[in-house]
Image: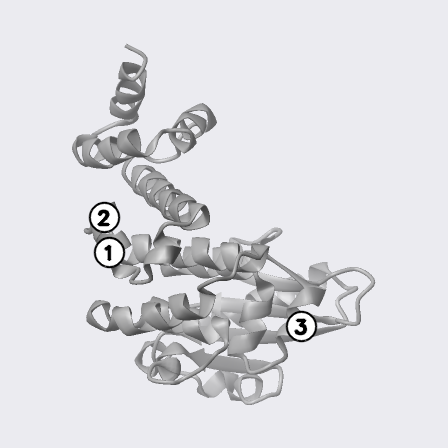
Amino acid sequence: MKTDSLFFQLFQKMPQLFFEILGEPAAWGDNYEFHSVEIKQAAYRIDGIFTPKPHTAAKTVIFVEFQFQKDEFLYERLFSEIMLYLAQNPTAEDWRAIAVYPRRSIEQENKYRHRTLLQSEQFQTVYLEDFLGQSSERLGIQLMQLIVAKEKDTQPYLDGLIQQLQGKTDPKTQAIIEMVSTIMVYKFPQLSRSEIEAMFTVSDLKQTKVYQEALTQGEKTLIIRQLSRKLGRIPPEQLSVIQHLPLITLEALGEALLDFRSPADLKAWLKSLDE
C-alpha cells in the first residue's frame, strides 16, 4: 500500500484531521493549507508542509515527514530540507516538524548528533501504533487506525468509523467516506469490488450514491497508480479516458493491466473500446 500518498490525500482534503492526531484543536487546520514543496537548487522534496493561510492567526510553518521504511539518514535530510526552506522563505516566522512512523522500530537509530533538535519543542514524533486499541471519536485517529491496522484486524476499526458516519450527508462526511473507500481499495488490492463492499457492514450506507461513487473513485485511483508503476507516466488524454470509464469497463482494465508490458499495450486496449 502506498501509504504516504494516502496521507497526502487525507491531509490535503482535511487538514483538521492532522491536528487531531497531534492532540491539538482540529480548528487549527482551518488556518492551514497542505502541499508538497520542492527545495530549489537541491534534490530535496518535503513530503508535506502546512503553510499558514493569509490573514489568519497561524504563523508557524509545519513540516511533515511520513516514514514507513527504515532510513538511517532521515533526520539529516529532514533538517537540511527545513533549513534550506527557511533560507529560501525568509518571511516564515516560526517552524515545527513532525515525523510520522507506523511503529518505533522504523525510526532512525543514530540520533545522537541531532539530540538538541529532536528534544526541542519544535520537533515531535508520532507513532501510529500507539493509536491501535484506543477508543476515540476523533476521525483523524480513527482513520490512522484503519490505515495501520493489520489486515486481519481492520474490520472492527472500519465498523466503528462507518457507524459514526451513518446518517450524515454533509460535504465533510462525503469526503471522509471517499477517503475510507480509497484506503480500503489501497489496503486490499487483491480483493474485488464486491469483496470490499461486503466489508462495509452498514447496508443503508452501501446504498448511498456517495458511497458508490467513492468506492468507484478509489478503484480508479488504484488502477491509475498500478498503471503508472508498471508503464511510467500515463498521458493526460489516456488518464481522462480512464477517469470516465464505467465500472464494468474499469474492472476489465484492472484485469487486463496485469498482462501489459509497455505503454503501447494500454494505448491499444483503450483504442479497442472504440471498435
Q: Quarter-wise, where is residue 15 in the image?
A: bottom right
In the rendered image, residue 115, in percent from the top left (x then y), is placed at 51, 88
Camera-side residue of 199 and 14: 199
Residue that numbered label 2 is attached to: 194
2 and 1 marks in contact (CB < 8 Å): yes
| Amino acid type at mark 3 | Ala
Q: Label 2 crowding class (10 Å Cα cut-off): few <14, some 14-19, many 20+? A: few
Is residue 208 depicted above or below 111 in this figure? above
Checking the image for residue 198, the label placed there is: 1
Is residue 257 depicted above or below 164 in this figure? above
- Specify the quadrant that holds the N terminus: bottom left
Q: Which badge, 3 or 2, is on the more N-terminal residue?
A: 3
Mark 2 element type = helix
Name the mark nearer the viewer: 1 or 3.
1
Residue that numbered label 3 is attached to: 27
Q: Residue at x 26, y 31 (%)?
A: 253
* Residue that sits furthest to the top in the current view: 275
Question: Mark 3 and mark 2: span between their CA atoms?
Answer: 37 Å
> How many discs appear?
3
| Amino acid type at mark 2 | Ser
Q: Residue at x 23, y 31 (%)?
A: 252
Q: Quarter-wise, where is residue 245 in the image?
A: top left
In the rendered image, residue 14, in percent from the top left (x then y), is placed at 57, 61
Q: Residue at x 31, y 21 (%)?
A: 270
| Amino acid type at mark 1 | Ala
* Residue that sits furthest to the left in the current view: 259
